[in-house]
Amino acid sequence: MYAKLFRNNIKKALRDYVIYFFTLVISSTLFFAFLSLTSRYNDILGGDGNYSLALFQNTIRYAVLAISIIFVALIRYINNYMLKQRSREFSVYMILGMEQRTIARHFFGEAFVFGMAAVLTGCIVGTVLSGMMTTFVMRTITSAASFRLGFYPDTILVTLLFFGAVFVLVGMWNVRRIYKIKLIDLLNEKKTSEGQKKKKRHYAISLVSAIVCFAITGVVLYKFTNAKGIYAGSIPDEISNRYQAIAIVTAIVGIFALYNAVAFLITIVRRKKKWKNHNINSVLLGNLFQKVSSTTKILSISTLAITISLVAFVILPMLAEITTGYLDYRMPYDVMIYNTYMYIDEIDDIPQIDFSFVGEILQEHGIIVSEDVSQRSYFVWERDFNTVDTREYWHDLPRLAMSISDYNDMRRMAGMEPVQLAENEFFMHLDYEMDMESVSDSLGTGHRTIQLDDGTPLNLAETAIYNDPLGTYLFNNGDSILVFPDSVCENLRLARTCYYANTGTVIPYSLCDAIRNEIADSFQTDYSYLFDKYEAKYQSDRHYTSFIDPIRFWTQESNDVALTATSVRLLGIYSGIIFFIICMTVLALHLTTDSIDHHMQYRILYQMGTDRDDIVKMVSKQSLCYFFTPCLVAFIVALLLIYSFIVRYGHKVFTYMSSIGFQFGVLIPSLLVVLILACYYGATIYTIKRALTNTLNNIK
């Protein structure tokens, strides 16, 4: 008898909670597919000497596990909801003589089998998705990659153990709850004070709070936008953080105050005879008030989670595109070595570095340098030299100058034509992200001549500004450098020497770390006086870097950036989908169970002569309002947060994001959101209308 009851309950759960089952299938599919990218059985992502997947796989593994903790909240919430809906059924079992321990075991078993069936289905579907994702990852590294399915027993085991552990954890909590609950409490489990009015003062405070919070958010974003015109470059991080923190906090508080305000507005509308007496609007408004006022916390949390998912859908892929585009700008050469004088106290200690040892080290590893340049930067005025003790801020470093010959050598190595400069002229090279037009306007007709320490005057050239992508090492913690004639630079004090090289063969990824260590050790040997004099003094400083650091290789940077960007894109989609479908599931289950709970109301309306179509329209309007209001509010808040991101990083977005990046970063996530929303709403409204039709058809 118990076995038959168990089977019937499983079938009933599949029918009543098909949306929850579907969500578990999607969740476990994504979980399996993403973790399969980190599987040791995934020989498709084997790697070779030219690239490494270690960083990518670790990022995916730990991020997916961290994000997936949210499943505990989902499964616990749904199990509690199922327990509440079946409370009267369980009370009948108790009245008929079934022990509470047996009821608890049955509920645990049903929920566990129901969930694990969905997870097993997800593993099967996830195998196909895994093949697609593996192909996508390989195509970011190599141009040739074909679709191929794989078998990942370790991923299957981890998926089953993870979800099984969650089901057991939540199930044991429910077993304990059922075992201790009294019969009278079980009978009254569904009798809550849903929809009852709160005090008028509470509604008024909520309405005012929502208006004030969203008004503050708008004002802060307006001021944030205007602040962009105050600074020549990017808005300082501390200013941006302040504006964005205030906007985010007020938006969150506004969301939690909003739904009590909505319930208050519904009560106002209910008093209007124009609306109340039209068809069965009084029933519709009553149901909406009951639902909104009783689920304000659920609606608020759902709105917040949908906001997070929308932001993750858009911003993370955008960050990935910016990172990828930025790579070509900051790494135009195969080898780049940065030199700094930041932790040197005496100007005479600044070394004139001979980087010939770098070519020798590369040659020992079979790598030939095809072209290189030791780019020297100089103090425009010797008084510009400052030390750790004389700087107001650690990054308070002056704008430097470089020679036209070094500048043209760098341009040739980057595949650009050289430029001309007269003996009595200079020009400015800007960071690639800077707006040339605004800087040119700020120069105007003034400040077009500078006079050096020896009295030499230099005039701004006719072509005063260049901003071709020559890397970020040119700038001394700023966003520009001056270019002088060689004869002028010969009389200036040296500030630093950076090294750039292109190689005839690709530097293998597996050799990059070893070569970097050899270069650093060789430099320390040749210029040991710097380390003897300053390393012990400053190495405890939190901003301390060695005198040649970082040392970067195109092979390593392109690999790490490409795979990091790919992991950010994938995790943006993963987190966005997970948060979104969880919210859709919660909202859908509330609506479907409500349609079952209100079947008596629909029967009475139909028996009183209300047209069937009017009842269907009322239910559709109610579902539409409840389902889409959190989505609409979340969309508006997410739009504001994304706008603040554009204000802060807009120069990077417009500089490095291609049209293809825009499609992947904005259009595809938008289509994915619309598709998920349409699927869940379509399934929900279909389930509700089917239940309503069955209810009305059974009326004699």
Image (cartoon, rainbow, N blue to C red):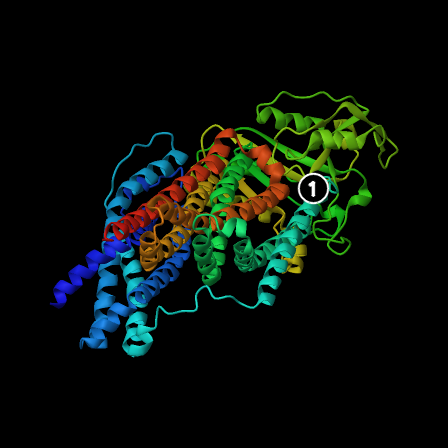
Instruction: Tell me where residue 66 appears, x and y as whole percent.
Output: 41, 57
Q: Mark 1 points at which residue?
A: 478
Is disc 1 placed on a helix, strand or loop? loop
Direction from residue 101 to residue 257 in the image, left or right: right
The total number of labels drawn is 1
Q: Name the foreground residue: 86 vs 29.
A: 86
Find residue 562 and report its image quarter.
Answer: top left
Q: Name the foreground residue: 178 vs 340.
A: 178
| Residue at the farthest right position | 455
Query: Can residue 561 be seen in this snapshot?
Result: yes
Find residue 185 and report its image quarter.
Answer: bottom left
| Residue at the farthest left position | 1
Q: Which residue is drawn at 40% across and 69% down?
A: 192
Please rate how many residues cluster around mark 1, counting C-alpha atoms within 10 Å: few if below 14, some from 14 to 19, many from 20: some
Given the image, on which type of amino acid does mark 1 rest?
Gly
Q: Name the foreground residue: 68 vs 114.
A: 114
Direction from residue 256 to residue 239 in the image, left or right: right
Quadrant where the N terminus is found in the figure: bottom left
Find residue 150 and report its image quarter.
Answer: top left
Q: Name the foreground residue: 634 vs 245.
A: 634
Instruction: Tell me where residue 214 appears, x and y as whole percent.
Output: 62, 52
Instruction: Tell me where residue 297 appears, x and y as whole percent.
Output: 48, 62
In the displayed structure, 150 sits above or below 544; it is: above
In the displayed structure, 316 sits above or below 393; it is: above
Instruction: Tell me where residue 593 appears, x and y as whole percent.
Output: 33, 57
Q: Which residue is drawn at 28% across and 51% down?
A: 696
Query: Can residue 543 be seen in this snapshot?
Result: no
